[in-house]
Amino acid sequence: MINNINTLTYILEIIIVIIVVLLAVLCIVYFMSKAKKKDKEVKMENKRKAIEDNKKAKTFAVEPVFNFMEFDKIEDNMIVQKDGNKYIMVVECQGINYDLMSEIEKNAVEEGFIQFLNTIRHPIQIYTQTRTINLESSIQTYKDRVKEIEDRLERQEKRYKEMVASEKYSKEQLDKAYYELTKQRNLTEYGKDIIYSTEKLSLNKNVLNQKYYIVIPYYPEDIGQNNFDKEEIKNLSFSELYTRSQSIIRTLAACSINGKILDSNELVDLLYVAYNRDESEVYGLDKAIDAGYDELYSTAPDVLDKKMRALDEKIEVEAFKKANEKVNEAKSDKQKELEKKENNIDSLISRMAKLIIDQNSSVIGEDIATRAKEKINSERIAKKAKEGGTKENVKKETKRKRATETN
């Protein structure tokens, strides 16, 4: 009995130990899963924060394109910088081939350049710009010119054939005409050869040209203390820069170098190539201007201004219309009056003839005057009857008109 009790007690202890172990394992598994879930939530939160941080890092403020350029505007053949605190004028110089000159010419150029350096009293910058030569416009010019020559050649050929066919010209005249025709034919072939050579040359993408510029700056602060407004400062800057540029051009002339001041459009072209070096070879400034790039953005005028302009246009149209109507009416009135006179010309002539007879009745006598007026009436009645209608109707119409004239 006691042994059975001990055995049961041992079995119960083992069961209790197993249950405790299972509970411990379950607790460990629970806490581990909870920790994993928490770690996963932390990772997700960190990932979300990282994505938000990346989005914030990618956002940037949009700035005007002029903030990236080194100039404000181009005005009066000058580049304006630093809000009017610096003005620049540019002189383009025509290069010379120094290597092909003789020793005397080289010495003259060197002496002239030394003189140029000695006369400089202000800072300058020498700028070289390499451009791709665009032969498209030259080719088109050649083609237009050759087309004119071809048309002239066709006319001369036709003229020469007519001269030969007519057999009215001497051999000397025909030889002279054939000589002129040959000259024109050779000129046409020469023009076509130029076009072919130029087009072949344009296929080479390495056709480059170097342009040389002298950049002349001016700072209005050099004037010192002043009470000038911006317009006056701009005019003073232009005068000073123009004087400096002309001085440089005259000095460079001693080196056989020709120079000129770039105008506003040429300055735009210079900056356009500088800022768009690759695109300028394909889409030049001239094409941009022709495409109306400066008309892409425009501000609408005030509504009242638009209405006023529309009213002005309407008034002008209506005024022209009314003027034309009244002119036509005036012409119609005159036309009607003219037609009336043309229709009553016989009556008017008869009336005026009677008036003349009455005024001179004392001279010609009353009897003669009466018979003359009766003859006028008879002639008129006969003419009316001839044109149409009976004599009775004509007499009645005549009496009615006399009564009307008497009244």
Image: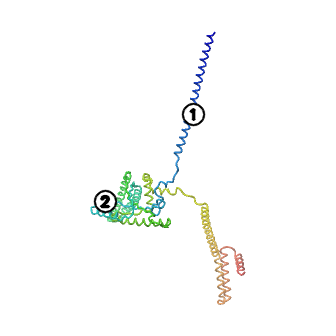
Res. 27 mark: none
Label 2 SS: helix
- Indicate which disc, 1 or 2, sits on the residue closer to the N terminus: 1
Look at the numbered disc 1 and give the secondary structure of its residue: helix
Q: Nearer the viewer, residue 222 or 9?
A: 9
Looking at numbered disc 2 in the image, what kind of residue is underneath it? Tyr
Please identify the quarter of the rendering in which residue 22 is found. top right
How packed mark 2 is, by other alpha carbons closer than 10 Å (few <14, some 14-19, many 20 or more), is few
Where is residue 92 shown, x and y percent of the image? 39, 61
Q: Which residue is mark 1?
A: 38
Q: Nearer the viewer, residue 329 or 50?
A: 50
- Residue 98, which numbered label? 2
Q: How many marks?
A: 2
Q: Is residue 225 above or below residue 3?
A: below
Query: Which residue is at the far top?
Result: 1
The front one of 342 and 388 is: 342
Q: Name the quadrant of the C terminus.
A: bottom right
Q: Nearer the viewer, residue 218 or 132?
A: 218
Q: CA distance from mark 1 to mark 2?
A: 82 Å
Provide residue 325's location: percent of width, then percent of height. Answer: 62, 68
| 153 to 45, vertically: above or below | below
- State which quadrant residue 35 falls in: top right
Tag 1: Cα neighbours inside 10 Å, few (<14), some, or many (≥20)?
few
Query: What amino acid type should be assigned to the residue bearing mark 1?
Result: Lys
Q: Which quarter of the picture shows residue 118? A: bottom left
Quadrant where the N terminus sits is top right
Q: Can you see residue 315?
A: yes
The reply, left or right, for residue 253 in relation to residue 234 is left
Q: Nearer the viewer, mark 1 or mark 2?
A: 1
- Looking at the picture, how far across and down is residue 46, in whole percent? 54, 38
Q: Which residue is pictured at 41% across the width and 63% down the height?
A: 261
The residue lying furthest to the front in this view is 2
